[in-house]
Amino acid sequence: MVVLMVLVFLCTNGVESRKAKHVDCFQYSAISCRAYGASLADFGGVGDGTTSNTKAFQAAIQHLSQYESQGGSQLFVPAGKWLTGSFNLTSHFPLYLHKDAVLLASQDENEWPVIDSLPSYGRGRDTAGGRFISLIFGTNLTDVVVTGENGTIDGQGELWWQKFHKGELKYTRPYLIEIMFSENIQIFNLTLINFPSWNVHPVYSSNVLVQGLTILAPVTSPNTDGINPDSCTNTRIEDCYIVSGDDCIAVKSGWDEYGIAFGMPTKALVIRRLTCISPFSAVIALGSEMSGGIQDVRAEDIFAINTESAVRIKTAVGRGGFVKDIYVRRMTMNTMKYVFWIAGDYGSHADNGYDPNALPVIQNINYHDMVAENVTMAGKLGGLTGDPFTGICISNVTIIMAKKGKEVPWNCTDVAGISSGVVPQPCELLADQGPEKIGECNFPEESLPVDNMQVQLCTYRGNYL
């Protein structure tokens, strides 16, 4: 097994010859390396923070796409502030940001083309119509890398948030990175701040690695989810620090009848070494758009501070689909409203065409080795009448209630499961098995294919005036 190691550093950054030609050299780990490369400055890019570079990005990537059949190419973004609207990636292509590079998302709506809503959603998330394309977008790609030496992408989201709150949006707000119908995707070693809506959205894709991201947004900003794997297979999220106005990670697979018809689940998802701060949302949310199904999610070594809930399952009548085979262990939390939260009454439908007989299946949900302090309520678990959520297992969990915490720490309806070694003692619907069953809630030990993706060390050395 070869584990992806983020090894990015500047080899040289000096002056060469009397013409003061800059020499940039860096290394990073990728599935495959490139023989060709260029700098954004080669295509007229100006990093002054006010000049639009949308055309420069588009021209650079269009030019570099000619090397797809020759092993691909890479685009280097030098130090500077690079204002830009949306641009599309190409296959066999890394986008690399210098440590002092800042991409500034344009606030001019004319630089954001409008595209169709996602087929598994049937409409935009903000409005019933289409949606503004994402800042960094790609579809039907293979072998794509978005990375840097912790370079920054600034969404300048305040204007968009104001339009959202005032009801002035004509279309759904843009996301930061969205890659669709693609495979072998790497997104790592970047700082993402203040984006208008979701930050990282791989959708209808496979073999996705997201690592070493710092994602920051005001905790009151609307829908600024951190990382949202959506109808994806084999995804690994590791070593990320997220402060968000919404869920730090939201696992999705389509909305109501549209997600059911599209029928593409999210499965084989690994989440490791995540730190989350989100006072009004979850560390990890499963749903609420889960109509294509969510299966085999493994989360471990998670740290949460001042966050509404740990792992929240959100669903409703009309969603259909399933959430099953969920495994969480080694989670440490401080200052939480809830630790465990399952909501079968989330509502929020795409339209009135949903099937009221489409009931979600929630089963085999496992939590093990967790500690939480300063908690308002230990668990709020609510299934559906006539459609209970089953196979819930909670073991070796210690929850220290806040001084002003709920007198009754658990509220359970229409659920079934077991518990062992849990403090405070859970509700009767989670039958206590005694201390001898403390290891009852299992966590699979065999690795998933995404853990075995092989990478190599790649070097870029470029000269530009």
Image: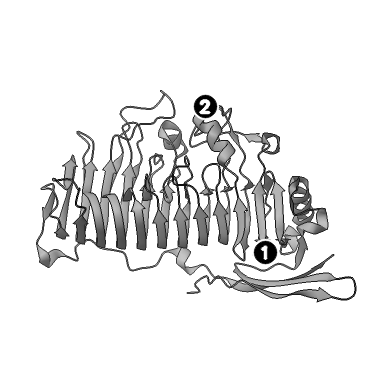
Callouts 2 and 1 close, C-beta under 8 Å: no
Horizontal arrangement in the rendering, residue 383 relative to residue 235 (left or right): left
User: Which residue appears at 65% of the width and 39% of the height?
Assistant: 107
Way the structure is coloured:
one colour
Q: Label 1 belongs to which residue?
A: 98
Give the CA separation, mark 2 to mark 1.
Answer: 37 Å
Q: Amino acid at mark 1?
A: His
* Pointer 2 local density, CA inside 10 Å: few below 14, some 14–19, many at least 20: few
Q: Position of residue 273 (x, y in %)?
A: 41, 64
Q: Residue furthest top?
A: 352
Question: With respect to residue 25, does 119 lie above or below?
Answer: above
Q: Label 2 belongs to which residue?
A: 167
Q: Secondary structure at mark 2?
A: loop
Q: State which quadrant residue 26 falls in.
A: bottom right
Q: State which quadrant residue 328 falls in.
A: bottom left
* Residue 48 in sight: yes
Q: Position of residue 145 (x, y in %)?
A: 62, 60
Q: Nearer the viewer, residue 377 or 34?
A: 377
In the rendered structure, which disc, 2 or 1, sits on the residue that comes first in sequence? Answer: 1
Question: With respect to residue 166, does 388 lie above or below?
Answer: below
Q: Nearer the viewer, residue 431 or 221?
A: 221
Q: Nearer the viewer, residue 424 or 123?
A: 424
